[in-house]
Amino acid sequence: MKRFKKAMTFIIMLAVMLGAMPAASALTVQAGEDQEEDQNPEVRAASPSDIAVRAAESKNTISFKYSETKKIELIVENKGTETLDVTITPRVSEKIREWPFEIENKDYTQEIKGMEGNTEQKIEYTFTARENVSSKYYKLIFAYTVTDTSNNQVVPEGECGIYVKTIAKPEEKPQNPSDQNTQNPPADDTQEPIGDISDAGGIINGDVSSGSGGGDGSSVTATPRVIVTGFTTSPAVVKAGTNFSLTIHLKNTSKKTAVSNMLFELSAPTEGMDANTASPAFLPASGSNSIYLEGIKANGTADISIELNAKADLVQKPYSVDVSMKYEDSEGGQYDSASAVSIPVKQDARFEFSEFEISPASISIGDEANIMCELHNLGRVKLYNVKAKFEGDGISTEEQFIGNVESGATANIDAMLTGETVTAGPVSMKMTMSYEDEDGAVKTEEKEFQLEVMEMMEPVDMGEMMIEEPETSFPYIPVIAVVVVIAAAIAGIVIYKKKKKQKLQKEEEGLADEFDRLTEDEHRES
């Protein structure tokens, strides 16, 4: 009997402990959620894509003649909503091959304090070209850093690149009295590029040097000069890794002297960081880089052409092709001259998207679904002002600004889509990714995904939920059933042991009676 009471007491304690467990778990979970919310406050920090810096000029390249002073204006735009401090510094160098301007200030850093969101400001720099600059193109780099004034967080440095052209000082030459009527171009006869450097390149013509033979200055024969007046490429846009035809337009500037026996040699700069794999940016597609031309009459023009191949790993920028010339005049005098043409090379943008992650895959009207994917820039060009626009039947249009994506970098696309109308099951919708290339041309790419929008669910009475919650928050019926089964099992064991004990007692009493009976029988016989 005592064992039965102990067993029932154990069963009751077990039931009480099981009933208290859900409440304790709920308190633990709630405490964990509260702690997580306290440790992860939502802070909006500025990102590098919030600030954009660009030239205020038109797309035409800014030209600086030797010793000329001009202003370069920049537009700084805050595309975000936070108030930011922006610091801009040009990368100045004492080396003329890197910085073509006189270093007149100790520090060229400019600051914009408290720049509010969705605004833009103009800053300007005044530069003076050095007197001994060469005729060439420079890319000026302006580095900038951004500080979020709300939390003093400094955003990593960004860059803005601007092309400028410098024109060298012409060499002074004594005038030849016998050639006063000859209209030879000056020594720095430089042809202006047609449009932007990234669109059509440029032309630079050098000086003419005389060799042996021919006129000696006292002859009536004028010194003939052959210059490059222009060039064309076919196709018009030269892409890295492809063949193209280069046609160079020539002119004999002398009005009295024809030139003949002309030999041209074309050469391009060597590109590549590894000495084992470095090679010229352009190589002849077939044959030699030398071109022969029979001659050009006085004040005449002619064209030469060559098929070239652009290296596949060229960085997107203009590349120079040097054109050296050797020719003779009508008296056998030999002359050497050199020119150069600048050919812009384009790289195709290459990128890919990861698979979409959509949670949940179906929503009700008014609910939101989170959609995420990654953009991998696989090309050698930077993607500017990247945007992602989500649209389709059943959802409200959502647009997200990603910013600039460097070559080899990955950008995250993360948006929330809101259901507006019911769809007939999962339907195809699309994301349109747009970006700008270095010329500002906008290009797009589309990717489809599927989402289902269902009818709005009926609202649930929170009062009824609170009343019914105690009945459904813990499975009392299964627990009670388990307790009853355990109690029945324990009771059965106790009863079985009790009956076994009683049976043993009866057997012992029977044996004792038999023994007494045998003893009495033996006593009577004696």
Image: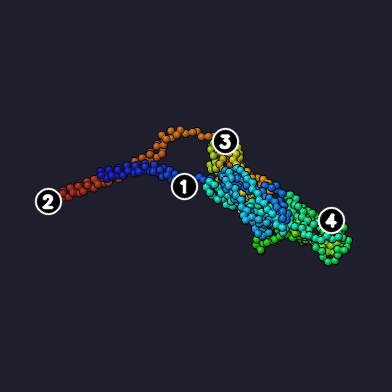
Count of residue discs: 4
Three-letter residue code for mark 2: His
User: Which disc is residue 39 wearing?
Assistant: 1
Q: Nearer the viewer, mark 1 or mark 2?
A: 1
Of 358 and 274, the residue lying toward us: 274
Tell me which numbered mark, 1 or 2, is placed earlier along the sequence: 1
Q: Residues within 10 Å of mark 3 (few under 14, many from 20)?
A: many
Q: Residues within 10 Å of mark 1 (few under 14, many from 20)?
A: few
- Measured in 3D between alpha carbons, the distance from the residue under mark 1 to the one under mark 2, in whole angstroms, is 98 Å
Q: Residue at x 30, y 43 (%)?
A: 9
Tell me which numbered mark, 4 or 2, is placed earlier along the sequence: 4
Q: Nearer the viewer, mark 3 or mark 2?
A: 3
Three-letter residue code for mark 1: Gln
Question: What kind of element bears circle 2?
Answer: helix
Q: Name the spot of residue 280 as percent of width and height, x first.
A: 71, 60
Give residue 181's quadrant in the image.
bottom right
Which residue lies under the disc numbered 4? 183
- Measured in 3D between alpha carbons, the distance from the residue under mark 4 to the one under mark 2, in whole angstroms, is 170 Å
Of 73 and 98, the residue lying toward us: 73
Tell me which numbered mark, 1 or 4, is placed earlier along the sequence: 1
- The quadrant of the picture occupied by the N terminus is top left
Three-letter residue code for mark 3: Glu
Which residue lies under the disc numbered 2? 523
The image shows residue 28, relative to residue 189, as above or below, that is above
Q: Nearer the viewer, mark 1 or mark 4?
A: 4
